[in-house]
Image: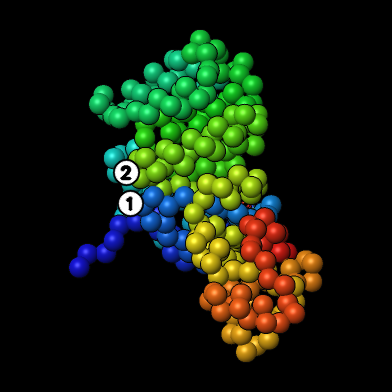
Amino acid sequence: MSEPVFPLQITQLVKDFTTKRALDDFNLTLAQGEIAALLGPNGAGKTTLIGCLLGFLSTDEGSIRLFGEDVNKLTPHTRNRIGFVPQTMTGFTWFRVGELLSYLAEYRPANAPQDNRWLDWAGLDPRARIKSLSGGERQRLAIVLALRFRPDLIVLDEPVASLDPQARRDFMRLLPDYAHHHGATVLISSHIISDLENICDRFVIMRRGQVVLDVTKLVLQGQVRHLSAPPPESWGVQTLAPAEDGGVWVSGWLPELDNAACQSSLSVQMPDVENLFLDLSR
Ligand SMILES: Nc1ncnc2c1ncn2[C@@H]1O[C@H](COP(=O)(O)OP(=O)(O)OP(=O)(O)O)[C@@H](O)[C@H]1O
């Protein structure tokens, strides 16, 4: 039987800068249609990871495969299946918005499918010069450029930091709609965890270049709990991290865990991603 082909498969990745190991045995595989949050404190390695998986940065060990192809040997077809939204858009400043859209469209096949909802959402004046756009308007343009040609794998590095609240909210509604509609896979990094909690079905938390927790929303809701104090060993649950409030994060099989907590003096709470993230990041 042939191996499944994943949109993204990162295996034992190592990335060293001169004085720093930024990624250390990093592993991540995304299946088609998954919307995954990439979370980590400043310096955790998120941008480095994204740079490596898009082929912008060289790697030292391990492998990165996109739709089954080595990231450094992507065919043009596969390259066209990937959309990348950077933290800030640079370059192309001499173009007008409409000129840049037309110019970049020439690099696509004439019949390439498009999704115009992003242009509608961005609301940009095609006659505006890119150098005169505000930071948020440039970011809208970056999103249009990355998503207009219906990518199957979307990688977003802090895409909403410069968007106003309405644009950010609308974008965070459109993105999962788009992904579900087209079966696209999404990897999104952001420090605004409440946004990600709503739209993501998987949470990958990294620290110091490594994955410290990789959990689906289903497992998070079904098996991860915050306890007010460490549980007895006999419960057989795994301790994930101590919590700042003196409690502890555990993972175990429910309802056994909830039943056990009911019969003891421990209080048990459903997880919220932000607190779990903060405690795992310490
Ligand atoms: N070109 C570079 N040379 C040396 N060290 C680097 C370089 N780029 C990044 N680093 C280091 O690698 C580590 C990971 O950086 P990275 O930018 O990937 O973190 P991040 O998780 O994206 O952080 P942030 O949330 O602040 O954007 C940091 O310690 C950073 O100082």
The residue pinned by badge 2 equals 78
Judged from this view, the residue extending furthest toward the bottom is 234
The foreground one among 248 and 3 is: 248
Residue 277 shows up from this direction: no
Could you give the CA–CA distance between mark 2 and mark 1, rounded to whole angstroms? 7 Å
Give above or below for 228 relative to 189: below
Relative side of 69 to 58, left or right: left
Labels 2 and 1: the sequence-earlier one: 1
Q: Position of residue 147 (x, y in %)?
A: 43, 33
Q: Residues within 10 Å of mark 2 (few under 14, many from 20)?
A: some
- The residue that appears at 56% across and 53% down in the rendered structure is 38
Q: Position of residue 200 (x, y in %)?
A: 52, 50
| Image marks 2 and 1: residues in contact by CB distance under 8 Å | yes
Quadrant (top left, top right, bottom left, bottom right) of the C terminus: bottom right
Q: How is the image coloured?
A: rainbow
Quadrant (top left, top right, bottom left, bottom right) of the N terminus: bottom left
- The residue that appears at 47% across and 22% down in the rendered structure is 120
Callout 2, which amino acid?
A: Thr
Judged from this view, the residue extending furthest toward the top is 127
Which SS class for mark 1? loop
Callout 1, which amino acid?
A: Phe
Which SS class for mark 2? helix
Give above or below for 72 relative to 13: above
- The residue that appears at 60% across and 60% down in the rendered structure is 206
Which numbered circle lies on residue 67?
Answer: 1
